[in-house]
Amino acid sequence: MQDWSKLYDAIVDGDDKTSARLTREAIEAGEDPSALISDTMVPAMAEVGRLFEIEEYFVPELLLAGRAMKAGLELLRPILAASGVEPTGRIVIGTVKGDLHDIGKNLVVSMMEGAGFEVIDLGIDVPPETFIEAIRDKKPQIVGMSALLTVTMPAIKTTIDAMVAAGVRDGIKIMVGGAPVTEEYAREVGADAYGENASVAATIAKRLCAEAKAA
Amino acid sequence: MNRSFYIDLANRGLKMPMGTDIVLNEHPDPEAIRVDGRRLGDVMIEAARRYRTPLALPQMNLTLEKDALLVLMGLDGGAGEFHFTAPPSPELLARFEAGLKGPLTPECEANIEAIAHVARSSDLVPLGMCIGPFSLMTKLLADPIMPVTLAGMGNSAADNAEVALMEAALDLSTRLVLEIVDRQIKAGARMIVVAEPASNKVFFSPKLIRRGSDIFERFAMAPNRKIAALLKENGVELFFHCCGELIDEMVEAFASLDPAVLSLGSSRVLWQDAALVPKTTILYGNLPSKKFYSPTLFTRSQVSDSSRELIARMREIGHPFILGTECDVLHVPGCECTIRDKLDAIMEAVAV
């Protein structure tokens, strides 16, 4: 494999145009898409996550890097799909019913995609039945729910309860997050994991997926 | 009513949670009250009496202005989820400008009438309330962070469509907020709360700001300077509120608006922030009221301890201070008693 460190740098620097150009060059050079993702792009997003953790990067840099990652991934996805390569895992995600905030959720989407997941983003104000429908249709390993407000946070529990009642809870791992959500709250409502921020959420998702595959 | 009135209140140990939403939701028909100016004014009075403050605070409903803006443009389908994907057309802008001359939405009109009602029928100081222009703009776009960041990296509206859209949305937001503030002044508001929670480090990269980018000044501060100037012209004071996560440079920028009161979120250490703010600006806050719904996350005794510490520390450094909450205390169904109990703890707090 050629040295694609400039692609790595483009993602870390949040330069989507360079990321797309270099990915195109890599494809033309016959580079293995899976290797490009796992050896260059995912490590780049991991570095972005690390810089965020140490407060050298902030949310805007995280989003820029996510956009640069996406610019490359969009070119690789059709090739991966054609060759039958599976993503790290599949995640259905949304902001719960009554909550119109999506910045946190979008950040998580960005980091999850950066970690190699296929993300099905249900958007904001998502009722329990839409989550349930998506679980049945898309068969994700993980469902992520976000709430920004204390007044909308109870919808996380309502949604999990509805999943249990619909019989779709057992086959999935549930991750929750958002400003008022805590580890304790996640446990109380029956979630499997709590992500304190987008970077941590991606790491936890990888662990949950690995556990699910090992089980 | 001059600045010394408010500073005197602070120096006499005023404690004042933002509890209007809690009081509003104790009524059997809060939704009906929200569109009835007289009754809404009565709720402001009721909240001020309960929390023993001469300042009558309105509810902090930061969805009103977006609703109003879309209704004025005839785009009132599902305001919460609506986002502009292109700068508004000349026809939409003309409709918006024409609409600004008439009545706004029933909720906005009720807020304005509530201020007039407080001014007419009580001895309280009526406060107005509106969202800040930058925060309103963030509600109008699906992705407001990226264009701000792109602008910070040197892209201009002329060469980047996302930046152009953001600037157009910010212009609209500023125009509407100035109109609402003007109407609240005319209704008798003596001080106006400008709630600008999005002017924080989620939307503005500290990395870019520290590298010398002027994005915070251009997009967060410049529109608020227009509001501050309008208030000053009319002898009305500014109560500037931002509960987001901030860096010191942001606090200093807010202080440069010369607000009578600066209200910050619980992520800030007020006795340290006092060094960034002139003594002519009262610091307000900043108990973590977003956690008040939970019996365990921030207990009553933690509220009491933090209140006592805040009072004592602020007294020690000699900065005017009003003990309060980091934000409007929202009613959470099923948690009313827990929340009210903590608001009572604030009112009972005395310095150690």
Image (cartoon, grey):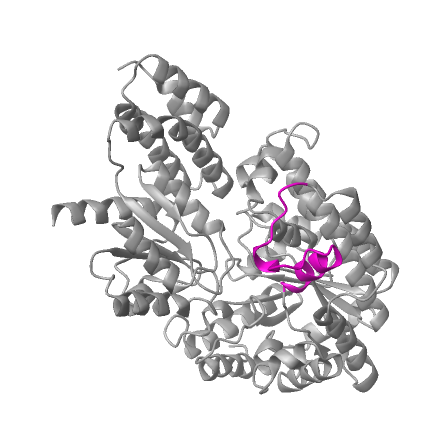
A99 to B11, vertically: above or below: above
Spot occupied by residue B183 in the image (x, y as percentages of width and height): 82, 66
Spot occupied by residue B36 in the image (x, y as percentages of width and height): 72, 80
Question: Residue A72 is drawn in which quadrant?
Answer: top left
Front residue of B55 and B73: B73
Front residue of B137 and B316: B137
Q: Which residue lies furthest to the right in this view?
A: B233
x 42%, y 28%: residue? A11
Q: Give the range drawn in magenta.
A: B62-86
x 78%, y 64%: residue? B237
Front residue of B172 and B262: B172
Image position of A71 (left or right of B7) = left
Is residue A139 covered in magenta? no
Spot occupied by residue B46 in the image (x, y as percentages of width and height): 67, 86
Q: Which residue lies furthest to the left in this view?
A: A215
Q: Can residue A148 be seen in this view?
A: yes
B123 to A103, vertically: above or below: below
Image position of A145 (left or right of B76) = left
x 24%, y 55%: residue? A172
